[in-house]
Image (cartoon, grey):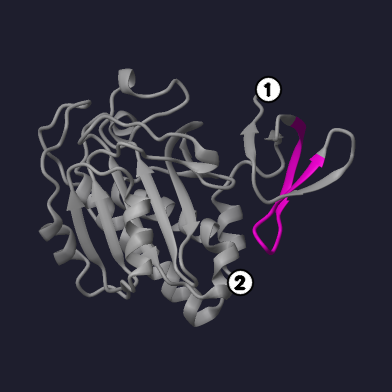
Amino acid sequence: MGLVKNSIPVGEPSGPFDTVFVSSQLALGPVPWTIQWLPAVDSTQDLVREAAGAGAQEGLTVVTDWQRQGRGRLGRQWVTAPGHDLLFSVLLRPGRTMLSLLPLLAGIAVADGLKQATGLAIDLKWPNDLLFDGRKLAGILLERGPEPAAALGVGVNVNSGVDELPAQASSVSLALGRPQRRETLLVAILAALGAALQRSREEGEGWVLPSWRQQSSMLGNRVSYERAGAVTAGVAEDIEDDGALRLRGDDGKLTRIYAGDVRLLRG
């Protein structure tokens, strides 16, 4: 998929979201995507979870320009300038066997979609961050809804400028040196997500861990892990079959991490 150019300066909002374009590009995909755009919401995750409870089908995608109460993992707030970035949530019904590896599968799909649309080589950081040149470019949040549904939230820094981002973050436009059309990125990400879900349903999930390992530089490197105020440092050895991170602490103790805050240690 080629790049779509426009004349929007980096750091400027990109205008109303074109759901017609997105829907037309996804019409023949393996998932029946339904695209809804709202200029502002409290949380796309909450809307998708409510829709799941009401029986909405898989593929419902809620996109917004601004979230008043956007959130990431561990209750962190996700803040972005209105209209600059790509913020959406997807209703998935993956089945119980796929749930444990769904966060890793989603990370692979978002990385693949971004690479296809932009050419950027994305580095996956367990469990939910996508990095470029060591800086956070995107993040995902998976929340289970009424069984067996799940709400997958994705935030991609697209057209935010340096002054609008934390020091440890970057955006697609900054990485490429030119602004990007959000619709094109969403099409590529959803197409990659649909393909990944279809592959898992046809082949099983055996491909997920090898693919994730190939797209991550964190394994074999030192990290710190924080949970409940306690910090442990060590080497991120591998990802377990259930998606847990295996950490070999500096004291030699082996820990399997299922949730918490993991940071890469430089130097």
Q: Is residue 16 left or right of residue 70?
A: left
Relative height, residue 138 to residue 53 (above, below): above
Q: In this view of the protein, can residue 133 be seen by the observer?
A: no
Q: Residues within 10 Å of mark 1 (few under 14, many from 20)?
A: few
**Is the stretch drawn in magenta largely helix, strand or loop?**
strand
Q: From the top left corner, tell me how far across and down residue 141 is, in percent.
A: 47, 49
Front residue of 221/130: it is: 130
Magenta stretch: residue 209 in it? no
Residue found at x 46% / y 74%: 199
- Closer to the N terminus: mark 1 or mark 2? 2
Residue found at x 58% / y 63%: 101
The residue pinned by badge 2 equals 206
Q: In this view of the protein, can residue 24 be seen by the observer?
A: yes
**In the rendering, which numbered label is found on residue 191?**
none
Magenta region: which residues?
231-248
Quadrant placement of the N terminus:
bottom left
Q: Residue furthest bottom?
A: 202
Residue type pointed to by label 1: Gly
Residue type pointed to by label 2: Gly
Q: Is residue 53 left or right of residue 173?
A: right
Q: Residues within 10 Å of mark 2 (few under 14, many from 20)?
A: few
The residue pinned by badge 1 equals 267
Q: Is residue 165 left or right of residue 178?
A: right
Q: From the top left corner, tell me how far across and down residue 205 is, in percent.
A: 57, 72
State which quadrant residue 197 falls in.
bottom left
Relative height, residue 155 to residue 173 (above, below): below
